[in-house]
Image (cartoon, grey):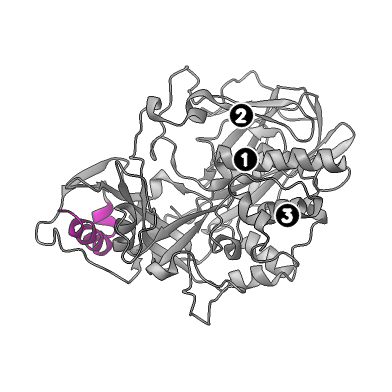
Amino acid sequence: MKNYKIFILVMFLSLIFSSCKKDSNSESVASKLQIINLSGNFGLITMSYKFKRTFELQNFYSEKIIIKNITISNSNFKLESPNPDTTVTSNEIQSCSSELESEKKCLLSVIFQPSNTNFEIGFIEVDYEINGGISSFKFQISGQGKEETETHKLLSQLGNKFIIKFADYNVKGKPIAENKFIKSILEKNHSRKFVYDDFFQDKANKGHEVWDLQLKVPRVIGYVFRSDTRGPSVQFKDCLDEWQNGYKLNDPMTGTEVEYKKQVDKFGNKINCGVEDVGGFWPRTTFPNDLKYINEMLIRYKKMTGEDFDITKQPIDDLPEAPNSKDFKKSNRGYIPTDFGKMTLILNWYLQNQLNLSAHVHENYDFKGFISTSYQAKFVHDWASRTIEGTSTYIMPKGSRWIYVIYTEGGFEMPESNDPDYKITKAPKIKFVKYDNKEVVIAGGVPWEDIMAYTEMDSNKIFFREGFDKMDYKAYKKIYRLLSSFKK
């Protein structure tokens, strides 16, 4: 949740992109060179003043690689000779130098020495050679400056535990339809620098109108709501088959089978699959069914053309907001066209648009990199309880239903379809705008530390993160009243 916390979206790390070449002599957008000692699967990398961090880099290729160059884009981060800390699993691993054999690891140490108090972002890039081609592995790190800011002092009041509060009987059974976004105290003196700013600006700088308009959509700092059928913890036996047993995909580039193993820790203990268990909410780019679908199309494409799908040769300017063909509308149900042109259009749409809001609002969430939330708690409650007014639309499965309160720093406050100032290119209608859902879209994922409260809908218990009431009392009181009002 902190403005110096950056997360690397799995879509850039996924096997799927190993088939999308950068050029004719380059391996992939996401390589099989990976850092393996990050906490969690999504690479939250933060560093404090004068803090040294040592990364384990592992070669998952079947051949050795030759490391040509290692650079950091920000001079406040410096490469040093490895001095393994507690995050490194073995102090017998050698430092990253020239050659790295298949399945072997090497150490890469970085120290953060800022010259000021600013929040800093840097990119570490490892250029390497494999099979005569040059590729690169790039990942982002961030750090906080010398002094503890007022924001850091506020954040230090938050704990890891959740405290039970019973619903306020004064408002129980009287649903409150709050239509104002709940701002956070953390908005004060915020730098307004957000995750993916550079990514969006780079796209806009290249003259792509849809990305330029996306920069005009307001980004907000405060609290939003999201419903889910999963509680914080779900027992392993109740998890999806892919979670329990793993699944396999064929690498579109090499044809070799790659196995995604079942979810167990390094000691063989089964990992549960609730929202807290998996570390938060993660976008569709991480879902097995989405990965399988894109993977199958990439394989079909190669069989048709004899070549890998090269995303760099596909136009962005000519991308429609959503292809109107019947084939595309079938695609989110797993349909794969046999026509080369249609397949190219669909692949280009999915692989170019993970963080394109104009694509997101067209109601096809497959392989997208956003998390949908709402700042109107009543809408989320009605959605979860299948009581959206004026419709019999299937909303959410029956059974256990939960509402989560999320702190968002830089969420996109989506425009209504009749808002001329922030309307996105030719988007005829924001998803569920007819239900007045007040959508806030979060790019990337939502780590568990950003969950400030949660409640099961049929329970009078509301769980608040320890210290939230002290850190942001005004917001806490509003959220407590809102959630209490939906209790019976």
Question: Which residue lies under the disc numbered 2?
Answer: 83
Q: Amino acid at mark 1?
A: Leu
Instruction: Identify the image quadrant of residue 261.
Output: top right
Question: Mark 2 against mark 1, which lies toward the viewer?
Answer: 1
Question: Mark 3 against mark 2, which lies toward the viewer?
Answer: 3
Query: Local crowd at mark 3 within 10 Å, few (<14), some, or many (≥20)?
Result: many
Residue 471 position in % (x across, y down): 29, 56
Q: CA distance from mark 3 to mark 2?
A: 44 Å
Q: Which of the two residues, 76 or 301, is positioned nearer the viewer here?
A: 301
Q: Residue at x 47, y 17 (%)?
A: 267
- Whether label 2 touches label 1, CB < 8 Å: no
Q: Residue at x 53, y 71 (%)?
A: 217
Predominant secondary structure, magenta span: helix
| Label 3 vs 2, first from the N-terminus | 2
Q: Amino acid at mark 2?
A: Asn
Q: CA distance from mark 2 to mark 1?
A: 38 Å
Residue 345 position in % (x across, y down): 74, 56
Question: Which residue lies under the disc numbered 1?
Answer: 291
Q: Secondary structure at mark 1?
A: helix
| Label 3 vs 1, first from the N-terminus | 1
Question: Which residue lies under the disc numbered 3?
Answer: 348
Q: Secondary structure at mark 3?
A: helix
Q: Residue at x 42, y 33 (%)?
A: 273
Residue 427 position in % (x across, y down): 58, 71
| Residue 322 visible from this viewpoint | yes
Magenta residues, start to end: 468-488
Query: Local crowd at mark 1 within 10 Å, few (<14), some, or many (≥20)?
Result: many
Query: Local crowd at mark 2 within 10 Å, few (<14), some, or many (≥20)?
Result: some
Q: Amino acid at mark 3?
A: Asn
Q: Secondary structure at mark 2?
A: loop
Would you say 459 lies left or right of 254 here? left
